[in-house]
Image (cartoon, rainbow, N blue to C red):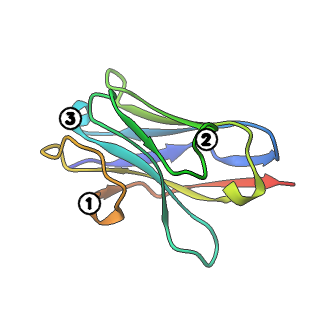
Amino acid sequence: QVQLVESGGGLVQAGGSLRLSCAASGRTFSRNAMAWFRQAPGKEREFVSAITGSGDNTYYADSVKGRFTISKDNHKNLLYLQMNNLKSEDTAVYYCAARPAQYYSASYYRREYDYWGQGTQVTVSS
């Protein structure tokens, strides 16, 4: 079982930066592929970025590529999302998610993540 708690959201002006963190419980963190998803009001939850258990491979949605960076500290059980050059369309609730430890590879699909945090609000003002 993995429990996830996000932090680091807030209000920022367009062009600014934020770093989201996700603290994970459990002893399998180094084997859990993880991801960030986001959900804007009235929209479906969408994929933002993912990372393999070891942190060797990362994946990004086209809309954030070149602006966001995902990383994983397996010693501290922490997942990060560094968000730079934020835009108003990045406004959403951001969720971290973890796959079961037996699935090493990351995924773009919500249904393949069993564990979810409660979300953290990111608001970008233009």
Who's the residue at 64% across and 38% down the image? Answer: 67
Kindly identify the amino acid type of the residue bearing the numbered disc 3: Arg
Give x and y (percent) for residue 113.
29, 57
Residues at marks 1 and 2 touching, judged by CB atoms closer than 8 Å: no
Is tag 3's residue or tag 1's residue first in the polypeptide sequence?
Answer: 3
Q: Is residue 30 left or right of residue 41?
A: left
Report if the CB atoms under discs 2 and 3 are less than 8 Å apart: no
Q: Quadrant of residue 18?
A: top right
Work out which residue is located at the far right of the displayed protein and give it: 126
Quadrant of residue 41 in the image?
A: bottom right
In the picture, the quarter occupied by the C terminus is bottom right
Q: Name the residue under label 2.
A: 8
Q: Which of marks 2 and 3 is in front?
A: 3
Q: Position of residue 32 (x, y in %)?
A: 25, 40
The residue lying furthest to the left in this view is 102
Q: What element carries label 2?
A: loop
Secondary structure of the residue carrying numbered label 1: helix
Of the residues under marks 1 and 2, which one precedes in the sequence? 2
- Which residue lies at the image location 37% right of the left edge and 24% below the top edge? 76
Can the viewer see residue 29? yes
As drawn, the residue found furthest toward the bottom would be 42
Q: Name the residue under label 1.
A: 112
> Label 2 neighbourhood size at 10 Å, few (<14), some (14-19), many (20+)?
some
Q: Where is residue 46 in the image (x, y as percent from the top left)?
A: 49, 63
Name the disc covering residue 31, or none.
3
